[in-house]
Image: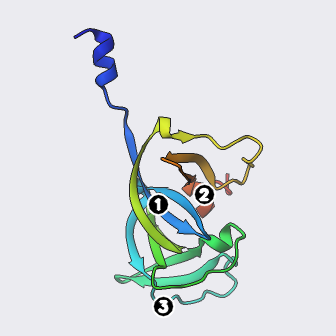
Amino acid sequence: MSDLAMFDVVEKEKKQYIVVKIGGEHYGIDISYIDNIVRLSKITRVPKAPSYYRGVINLRGEVVPVMSLRRRMDLDDDEFTDASRIIILKLDSGGLMGVIVDEVKEVLSLSEDDIEAPSSTLKSKNSFINGVGKNGDELISIFEISSIIGENEAS
């Protein structure tokens, strides 16, 4: 087998994403950020928190802040259903944060070739999207988690 033929056999590295639905659109979250997915539970409000935070939950004895992705992205307010879930994210700082999604659809593997950078005309400094994944005819916006949770705002 020639070196070129061996190169073709090497499979491109793929990353796994949880595909979620928010406001009728599909979004992907890198699975390496995900600690857990839980059903909606009682959310305790926190006075004077930013409007996109719904409050905090008690997750196995740990108080975890919960953010509304709909509010964070300036969409219509949350519509809680039996399919609504809180995705618990592991932050780079070591803490946890929950984000509310309308529905969890599936786990999907995408290679770098399956993901295109967002158009420069659509990408802003404060964009929450770092790429658009292609899964057949379906397009999936890939979240930039650090932008959503505000880790980039302090720098």
Residue toward you, 30 or 3: 3
Q: Dot 3: few (<14), some (14–19), or many (≥20) neighbours within 10 Å?
A: few
Across and down, in percent, residue 148 comes to: 61, 61
Of circles 2 and 1, which is in front?
1
Residue at image position (48%, 47%) is 136
Q: Amino acid at mark 3?
A: Lys
User: Which sits in the foreground, 92 or 101?
Assistant: 101
Q: Residue at x 43, y 66 (%)?
A: 105
Question: Are circles 2 and 1 on residues that touch, CB within 8 Å?
Answer: no
User: How far across and down, in percent of the image, does residue 99 sit?
Assistant: 52, 71
Return the disc, 3 or 1, that comes first in the chain's sequence. Answer: 1
Q: Which residue does the numbered mark 2 point to in the structure image?
A: 151
- Measure how far apart labels 3 and 1 are at the Cα level: 24 Å
Provide residue 110's location: percent of width, then percent of height.
43, 44
The x, y position of residue 74, in whole percent, is 72, 70
Is 57 on the left or on the right of 45, as rendered?
Answer: left
Q: Is residue 72 left or right of residue 145?
A: right
Location of residue 37 with respect to 131 vertically, above or below: below
**Quadrant housing the N terminus:** top left
Q: Nearer the viewer, residue 32 or 117?
A: 117
Residue indicated by mark 1: 19
Q: Say what amino acid the circle numbered 1 marks.
A: Val
In the image, what residue type sits under mark 2?
Answer: Glu
Instruction: Decide which of tag 2 and tag 3 comes sooner along the chain.
Output: 3
Say which mark, if any, is on residue 42. Answer: 3
Q: Residue furthest right?
A: 121
